[in-house]
Amino acid sequence: MDLHRAAQRAAQKITLGIVVSVATLLSFGAISKAQETIGTPGAPDARRVIQGLQIPAPPDQFGGRIERNAAQSTPFWPAQISPPKGAPNVLLILLDDAGYGTNSAFGGVIPTPTLDALAAGGLRYTNLHSTALCSPTRAALLTGRNHHSVGFGVVAEQATGYPGYNSLIPKDKATIARILTDNGYTTGMWGKNHNTPAFQVSQAGPFNQWPTGMGFDYFYGFNGGDTSQWQPGPLFRNTTPIYPYVGHPEYNLVTAMSDDAIEWINRVNTLAPDQPYFIYYAPGAVHAPHHPTEEWVDKISSMHLFDDGWNKLRETIFANQKRLGVIPQNAELTPWPADLIKKWDDLSTDEKKMFIRQADVYAAYLAYADHEIGRVIQAVKDSGEYDNTLIIFVTGDNGTSAEGGPDGTPNEIAVFNGVQVPVADQLKNFYEIWGTDKTYPHMSIGWSWAFDTPFKWTKQIAGYFGGTKQGTVVSWPKVISDTGGIRNQFAHVNDIAPTILEAIGIREPTVVDGVAQSPMEGTSLVYTFDKERADEPSHHRTQYFEMFGEYALYHEGWMAVTKVTRPPWDVLGPVNQDPANSEWELYDLSNDWTQARDVAAAHPDKLKELQDLFWQEAAKYQVLPLDATVAARIVTPRPSITAGRTDFVWNGPLTGTPNGDAPNVLNTSYTFNAAVEVPNGGGEGMLITQGGRFAGYGFYLKHGEPVFLWNLLGLQRERWEGTQALSPGKHQLQFDFKYDGLGAGTLAFNNLSGIGQGGTGTLKVDGEVVAEKRMEHTIPTILQFDENLDVGSDTGTPVDDADYQVPFAFTGKIDQITLKIERPQLTPADEEKLRAAIQVKKASE
């Protein structure tokens, strides 16, 4: 460490008014060797370290000699690109939907020994922030820019046609994976990819914004916000869909991705032992559905961590956090929101029993994920590369999710469609199977708030630390000597990419694929690696926050915040139509670390300063226009392969079309026609389906009889079926549905009346009606997230387990299936009524 110390002393000298950090000097030392050839120029084993300002790097000039004959010529191989000498491996770990107070390393009661061990041997960062939601945080993490700068002002499934919200990462903002790949790293990603536009995830591509198109050499995981861990979908290896769970009921993605990553590490170390790697490891845990194995549920349940309820849990976590030093000793525990969430002592015995089960399963899911991450880290240790591996473990992409609502739910998709399952029904029907593949569960908001201790609010809320504060651990044994140290500097997930580059000694490129790059907007944290600089003021001085029309600004120890107008569990409630004029609060974080005391009245000038600065930042980083809608953004039209189409044709089996690229039959009239040929002996199997066990439809033959079934959120099933089996030969089957409502157009008027209405379905065989019935209500917003549209068989889960099991391939021949959609159109009179309703509501307020 003599060189390190010497560099540190040099860093303390001020030259031209600039303080140069130790790590920067070390990085510049590596960069100064840019384009140095290692080995004999032109030899097959020659390598070169590039300057990195332009990627791909310009090719080597041929340095040999070419005559008419090879015998008189001299070959010259282009040098392979290599990272700077001594460059570390990088393991970037990101958990999902886990707030500051969940894990034991930051005061939580859920045991996370892997994270604890990393913290003991590295640094704990207490003041690093996310964006409050999944896709946006991940986009900022991978690009080093603000989330709106890269088109992810909201999750991919809610993209709208504005630059800050279209879910399209621009070409002038290359990812950290792309930069490292072109500087000689091998790169891999495992788990949740939530940064491919939801309208570009089909097998028709394009693939330029898939992981393999954004710089990763290898991808094993799923596209989208969440997935079942038991039957994950759509699950991919690179861009090929895979179904490893079929025939393997014990399969769980948490373990499978760990197995795959370990295999990859061993393969890379065997084939290219001198080449460093970058791993982005992002399990679906602990986002709903909470799917741990039975073994882990039993382990956690036996610990009785939650028997005293969520209010006592907050007190326990708060005391642990002070003991560990991850909150200041003078920090205040924010008040319990009794107007929003019941206190534990006010619950019934049945409620307590059900809610404890929910928390046990959630905790088991986190403990299980921590264990599997430990297996990956052990593989790094076994390879002998641990000391020179930079591990950055961000314990959540937002605060704990409150999307389960007051009672929690056995089916998260139900909540996003405005349906709550009463506790009595949960106890009766789901208690024993909670967390298995027969549920898609989420816990009560009481636990969510408690797991965000000591802060207010939860996931989705951008201005309060319950939505954004993420405990983070950094380990690099070769460099970080202040083991067990704590760092309190303000930081943001957009700081991670610049940190990785500086730690390695690689510059940000100025040109990628011929496109000039915009600079990263985050600030490197490498200066905090030194013990002597543990208390240096944060280099990240200003940071805006915005999500769903609620926003905030941090600046040099102050935080201006707009008040919450919509609880995050109220996904279908009224929304603020004028978010630009929201009411503000102000917090002095130097004296109030938990945002417990609003001081706006005492500091009006400071509040005005931060308000003005927010609007400057909002204009600079594509935050405008502000939009507080939730449901309306789920159903908004996007430029998918189905955009503008009302007629669809399938001329045979085709599986794996994800929801974002499938025709949408919600809130509309539609007609399916199926021309099929039934074989001798009778027909059986799936014709067309979208969704699965927790929401969707299926058109199939069961025992030779035609069935059209709507699975209404796993809580009710409506069926139309024939009375006799189809004879061998050709048949024409039709299901026609006439929708009664005005359609999704009412959402533009902040009105839900057009969605989820009923209609009448008619099933015909060869032109004859065989079943007709009315369905009183339909699914209003979304089908099961992780299922596909399949023709000819069914991937994922059945729409009715009692009828069949996947893949349920059709035994006959599908000549053609067509779908015609007739979407309702608002008339001028409809629009006038909807406008009048808005005025009536405003007057009543």
Image (cartoon, rainbow, N blue to C red):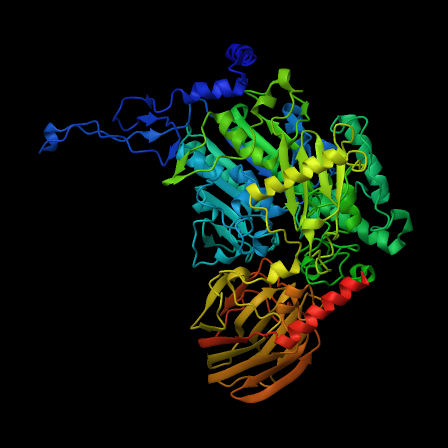
- Quarter of the C terminus within the rendering: bottom right
Name the spot of residue 432 as percent of width and height, x first: 76, 56
- Residue visible at 51% across and 35% down? 520
Res. 104 visible in picture: no
Name the spot of residue 562 as percent of width and height, x first: 72, 44
- Residue visible at 60% across and 40% down? 616
Q: Quadrant of residue 601?
A: top right
- Residue visible at 74% across and 34% down? 605
- Outermost bottom residue: 768
Q: Is residue 715 left or right of residue 393?
A: right
Count of all numbered marks drawn on residues in the image: 0
Q: Quadrant of residue 535?
A: top right
- Outermost left residue: 68
Q: Is residue 723 left or right of residue 641?
A: right
Name the spot of residue 656 as percent of width and height, x first: 50, 61
Q: Nearer the viewer, residue 756 or 551?
A: 551
Q: Nearer the viewer, residue 143 or 610?
A: 610
In this picture, is 485 found above or below 518?
A: above
- Residue visible at 49% across and 46% down? 169
- Quarter of the N terminus within the rendering: top right
Q: Is residue 404 left or right of residue 307?
A: left
Name the spot of residue 628 as percent of width and height, x first: 67, 54
